[in-house]
Image (tube, grey):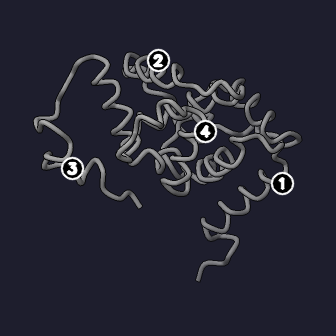
Amino acid sequence: MTLPMQDPEFQRQAIYERLMSAADGDRNHDALAKMYASWSLGEGALPDWLGLTPEAFRTMMGYHFPGLRFDDARCGSPLPAARGDEIADLATLVRGALAGADVSEGWIADILIAGCLASDHLWQDLGLWSRTDLSALMRRNFPQLAARNVKDMKWKKFLYKQLCDAEGIYTCRAPSCEQCADYAACFGPEE
């Protein structure tokens, strides 16, 4: 039998609640608390310091959760250097779509990019708790980009499709998404 304090869901919720009790009310604090809680337990696929530099990570966490310390935050692995061009392309895409409402959007952009480099659904790679969390994060931080996802395409597929479209690369063989044999893989449920 697993004691409640050993249960990962219990631990994740406890970390989340600790963070939220210190949150300053910023618009990204809920998503960051969920990502950090998952990541600190080895869930999701984010690299060291959520994909930020140690200094940026501490600054971000201090901004969102003042009074808490985050010195032992190295829980993942470094970003893959071999994917530098891909990282740069993603940065151009998402940083060019920032809402411009808050300094935390830049940190969120870098975390989002790190999550894109993993192999599961983006909300899972980020350590969010549902696709709804990711959709809200996208609308809040990248509203113009999010507005282009008119058919609710899975977010990682959508972002990479945006990169391909920008380069004039059309790897899909079907004349439209609706006619594609892989339609369910791009637009089906992620839960």
Seen from the viewer's position, the closer of residues 5 and 9 is 9
Q: Earlier in the sequence, mark 2 or mark 4?
A: 2
Residue holding disc 3: 183
Q: Earlier in the sequence, mark 1 or mark 4?
A: 1
Please tell me whether mark 4 sits on a helix, a strand or a loop.
helix
Residue holding disc 4: 140
How crowded is the residue under tag 2: few (<14 C-alpha within 10 Å), some, or many (20+)? few
Q: Earlier in the sequence, mark 3 or mark 1?
A: 1
Kind of residue indicated by mark 4: Arg
How far from the left and from the top, in percent, is residue 22? 84, 48
How far apart in space, not on screen, are marks 3 and 4 (Cα)? 27 Å
Q: Which tag is nearer the camera, tag 2 or tag 3?
A: 3
How far apart in space, not on screen, are marks 3 and 1 (Cα)? 42 Å
Residue holding disc 1: 21
Please tell me whether mark 3 sits on a helix, a strand or a loop.
helix
Q: Which tag is nearer the camera, tag 3 or tag 1?
A: 3
- Residue shown at the point (47%, 51%) measured from the top left: 124
Please tell me whether mark 1 sits on a helix, a strand or a loop.
helix
Contact (CB < 8 A) between labels 3 and 1? no
- Residue shown at the point (79%, 55%) measured from the top left: 18
- Residue shown at the point (38%, 16%) measured from the top left: 85
Seen from the viewer's position, the closer of residues 82 and 139 is 139
